[in-house]
Image (cartoon, grey):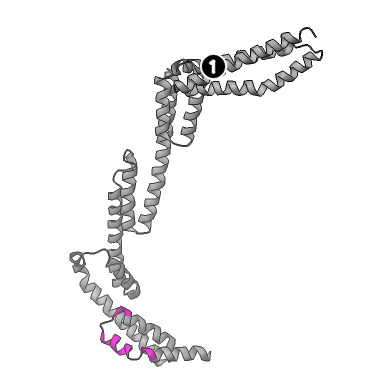
Amino acid sequence: MASSPAVSYWLIGIYGALLSVAVAAFVYGVVESNLTVGVAGSLGVLVALSTAPIAWHTRALVRSGGDGAGFVEAAARIEAAVREMTEVGALSDDARRVLNRGRERDLLRRAIEEDIACEDWDAAMVLVKELAERFGYRADAEGFRARIETARFQTQDRRVAEAVAGLDMLITEHRWDDARAEAERITRLFPDSMRVEGLRHRVESARGRYKTDLERRFLKSAEDERIDEAMALLSELDHYLTEAEAAPYQEVARGVIGKARENLGVQFKLAVSDRAWDHAASVGERIIESFPNSRMADEIRGMIDELRERAAGMRSDD
């Protein structure tokens, strides 16, 4: 019991010291605009105030006959921890960096790894430079640089390959305008890649080969009198030939067109003769669409409505 006043004095002294140090640190941080010291001071005040009820309760236990030596020791450890926190907070940024060198290195390495995983190469290189120049880990930095360059090259090479494959698909589909635009986009996007050189020439060469093939197939179809095929090829070829380029084919084209018109005329007459109104109307519409300025088309326009009505009536009877 006789030790109770001593414990009370110890308690008051310890918490007085804690609060004094913490408040002083907080005031210093506010006056000097030092956020770290201010936060450390505020934490010290918080620790002192939050543990005071526990200490006072322990004091009551001591007064009732318990031993307060353990509490005094624990309180001394709390005071020492607060002092250490305050002292670290009062250090300069460079001094704190030296104390936390190993931990900051690990954090920096993890951040670089995350940037590599996200393929954010530029951000990773900035952190690598920080690792080498600010912390002095030049061997680690060189290792990261090699990894980043390798990963950057592999990723870019894969993306270029995917882009060129898409371009080849456009070429296969004969979508020449889209292919030209895609070739220019790939060249702008990957200017350092050797694989993008000559992509525009690649498109033009493919177009030229396809045009030559169209011309050959058209002439062969016309020669073999495969008129429907020749007409389809002639229609497609019209998108590729300039007026000068088309001149050598005009005579063959006139012959194919004349044959096609004659064949459609014969089909139309046979359909009307056989009272196949549905077929007659379909062939008549083809003649009007394909040869709108011909005399045959003018004649069919005058009877097409009647043919459609008869075709509809025949379908309803069925």
In the foreground, 220 or 170: 170
User: Looking at the image, is 149 positioned above or below residue 236?
Assistant: above
> What residue occupies the far top of the structure in this picture?
2
In the foreground, 227 or 282: 282
The image quadrant where one finds the N terminus is top right
> Does residue 175 appear in this view?
yes
The residue at 61%/24% (across/down) is 46
Residue 146, given in percent of the width and then of the height, sits at 42, 27
User: Looking at the image, is 240 positioned above or below residue 222?
Assistant: above
In the foreground, 117 or 89: 89
Residue 121, given in percent of the width and then of the height, sits at 41, 34
What SS does tag 1 mark? Answer: helix
Q: Is residue 247 magenta?
A: no
Taking the image as shown, residue 103 lies to the left or right of residue 9, namely left
The residue at 32%/49% (across/down) is 183
> As shown in the figure, which amino acid type bears the numbered disc 1?
Thr
Q: Magenta residues, as a range? A: 289-305
Residue 164, given in percent of the width and then of the height, sits at 37, 47
Q: Quadrant of residue 132?
A: top left
Q: Quadrant of residue 85?
A: top right
Mark 1: give few (<14), some (14-19) or many (20+) Cα within 10 Å.
Answer: many
Judged by its main secondary structure, the magenta piece is: helix
The residue at 38%/89% (across/down) is 305
Q: Which residue is mark 1?
A: 86
